[in-house]
Image (cartoon, helix red, strand yellow):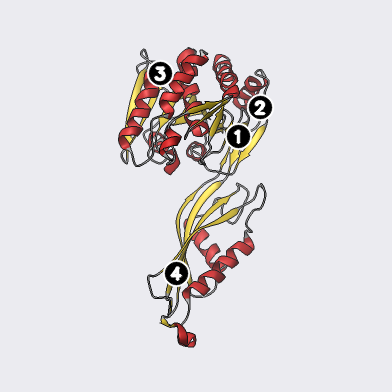
Amino acid sequence: MDMDEFLVAAEELLAIPSTADRGVELGRALDFVLGVVGAGVTVERFESGGKPSALVYRGAERPRFRVVFNGHLDVVPGTPEQFEPRRVGDRLYARGAQDMKLSALALAMAFRDVETQVPVGLQLVTDEEIGGHDGTGYQLAQGVDADFVVIGEYSGLRVVIESKGLLTARMRASGLRAHSAYQWLGDNAVLKLMRAVDGVLAAYPVATEEVWRTTVNVARVETEPGAINQVPAEATAWLDIRFTPGDADFANRTPAEVTAHLTALCPPGVTVEVDRVEPPHHADPDSAEVAALRRAAQSQGYSGDFLRKHGAADSRFYHQKGVDAVIFGIGGDGQHGPDEYADLTTVEPYYRALTAFLGGLR
């Protein structure tokens, strides 16, 4: 890898504010990385929900891929300064540096630089941060298939074989409006909702340290517009729940079953609406591909240890189709925060591990 070439390209890519609300910038980021890959490949373009994506491979006809490299080029919103990359020692600060433009760029370069006899695909999407359904999910619905997938989310060259599922739900409390000076004439929906929240958090306490269990985040609480001297009759809480593959309350449960479970934790007068249930992800730790990827990381001086992720990723779409997918990316810190950065010391070892992995495919 020419690190100077990489850094020039990385800073140009990071300067593109490719957030979900900027369709033109999403297209710019996608076209930029396709330009890095260059000519002599087949590029299939897709679009769903206004979000562009691409699938790159060698040959005229799309095969069933032995391996797919998957990278997303969209980022969460940031301040204007975060789209002005800056280097401080071995750190490159910018929105998307860690999550995950640098890993995506390295995946693209490894795909470009290694020609192998087995079919390899490069999947570039622009909607992972808002759910992935119009990128990875859409491409799989169009028949894209693979034996094994490497997703370049950050991991510090460790191998993520398991990640949590995601569901979002709303709890709605109904009461009776009244003058606040005469509380006994009303029924306060906010207080009822608070009891419901307490019931859910009693079952799934707020995590105060890293722990591999189901967690519930109370993301928002709202009540109807009204005067301060009114007893509110309506209140709503939004929940973000991350659950482990082994949690029988949520894993392999239908939205109706999840609704019934959460409702049982609430007092009368509170209803639950489940917006979506996204399954957890798991890959076989003993597969030949996982072993080969770990050896490739170890050859670069990294442990290749297994890692479990608390957040959801596009790996879940492959998992639902019975395809093993792992997360394997560079190092860094500050994901989605004001000081997000990539650890530049991990970039070349990451690229070399990817090329060694591809070169050993059979």
Label 3: state its secondary structure: helix
Whole-angstrom CA distance, mark 2 to mark 1, is: 9 Å
Amino acid type shown at disc 2: Gly
Q: Which of the 4 image quarters holds residue 264?
A: bottom right
Q: Do labels 3 and 2 touch, CB within 8 Å?
A: no
- Residue density around tag 4, few if under 14, some if 14–19, many if 20 or more, within 10 Å: many
Q: Secondary structure at mark 2?
A: loop
Q: Local crowd at mark 2 within 10 Å, few (<14), some, or many (≥20)?
A: many
Q: Quadrant of residue 178?
A: bottom left
Q: What residue is drawn where x is 62% and y is 57%?
A: 206
Q: Note whether 271 is above or below 352 in the view shown.
A: below
Q: Residue tagged by mark 3?
A: 36
Q: Nearer the viewer, mark 4 or mark 1?
A: 4
Which residue matches tag 1? 160
**Element type at marker 4?**
strand
Instruction: Between label 3 and label 2, give the one nearer the viewer.
Output: 3
- The residues bearing labels 3 and 2 have C-alpha atoms spaced at a distance of 28 Å
Distance from the alpha carbon under mark 3 to that under mark 1 = 27 Å
Asked whether, in this view, residue 108 is left or right of residue 299, the answer is left
State how far apart marks 2 and 4 are (Cα).
48 Å
